[in-house]
Amino acid sequence: MTPPDAAAAARDQTGAAAAARIEAGMRLGIGTGRAVAAFLRALQPRIAAGLRIEGVATSIASAQLAREAGVTLLGHGWTGPLDLDVDGTDELGPRLACLKGGGGALLREKVVARASRRFWVIAEAGKRVDRLGTTRALPVEVLPFGWAATAQHLARLGAEVVRRGHPRPLRTDNGNFILDCAFPDGLADPEPLAAALDQTPGVLGHGLFLQLATAAFLSDGRTVELVGDPQAQRWPGGALSRGGPEAGCAPGGYGPASS
């Protein structure tokens, strides 16, 4: 685990690295959490100097920070594609797979990530893991109605399930509950679990962000490592490409198709 001072420095570094690459006229997805707060702090002087951007915030807290930074926020009726989504993560696994939702904004974060051409993860280097689910439980956002029955179903998938918040349950910005699902051995193969969760009545969203991130900025508090290609684009809901939505892409969405 990264020491607190180093963690704060890492967030400042990755936030500044991402903020330096923002271009005028962009429509941004704005994630939630301390890394995103650092990104907005780094972006604020550029906006004050005349940079004009619009954004979609993924939480009430991020909306307030974005307004304070000078970002023009779009209303709830916004449409995609967004140019870029910037967000943190709780874990970063192989092939830029993410486990997210520690801040409780996972459902809105996924809506925005899927509607964005590019998705940059900004995080401390210590968030990198060989297997998702080894350091954090997987958050699952569920309807309050029948939440205990939904929890029973998740337990049958192998999870140790705890409703977040005690004695009163935490409510997301959407008014829902979060069930934190721990898997003792982590997630060796997260894709089938993600598919099962997507098909479970009562489950509204989960923290597995697979085949969505296009690049990651990681810092140990001293230097920033860039993983992936910050210019790579994923046509919203589709595959990854360095040539934009018209370029051919390999099955599975991890790179250009070979000719």
Image (tube, rainbow, N blue to C red):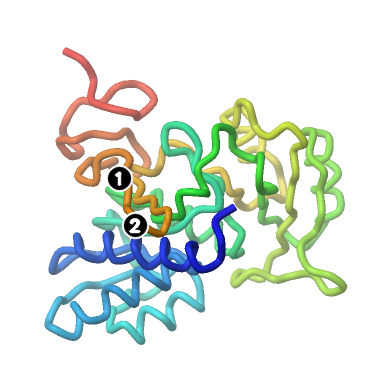
Q: Quadrant of the C terminus?
A: top left
- Taking the spot 66% from the left edge, 71% from the top edge, the residue there is 175
Q: Secondary structure at mark 2?
A: strand
Q: Residue 53, position in %: x, y?
A: 21, 72
Hey, which quadrant is residue 21 in on the image? Answer: bottom left
> Is 226 situated left or right of 125 in this image?
left
Of the image marks 2 and 1, the number of the one nearer the N terminus: 2
Residue mark closest to the camera, 2 vs 1: 1
Tell me whether the residue at label 2 lies in contact with that at label 1, contact meaning CB atoms closer than 8 angstroms: no
Residue 4 is at least partly visible in this image: yes
75 in relation to 259, above or below: below
> Is 177 situated left or right of 9 in this image?
right
Write down the residue under mark 2: 85
- Taking the spot 61% from the left edge, 69% from the top edge, the residue there is 174
Hey, which quadrant is residue 187 in on the image? Answer: top right
Q: CA distance from mark 2 to mark 1?
A: 16 Å
Q: Residues within 10 Å of mark 1 (few under 14, many from 20)?
A: some
Q: Residue 167, position in %: x, y?
A: 87, 73
Say which of 199 and 98 sits in front: 98
Residue 77 is at least partly visible in this image: no
Three-letter amino acid code at disc 1? Leu
- Taking the spot 23% from the left edge, 20% from the top edge, the residue there is 257
> Is 144 situated left or right of 136 in this image?
right
Three-letter amino acid code at disc 2? Asp
8 in relation to 185, above or below: below
Q: Residue 4, position in %: x, y?
A: 55, 66
Residue 24: mark: none
Write down the residue under mark 1: 226
Say which of 203 and 211 sits in front: 211
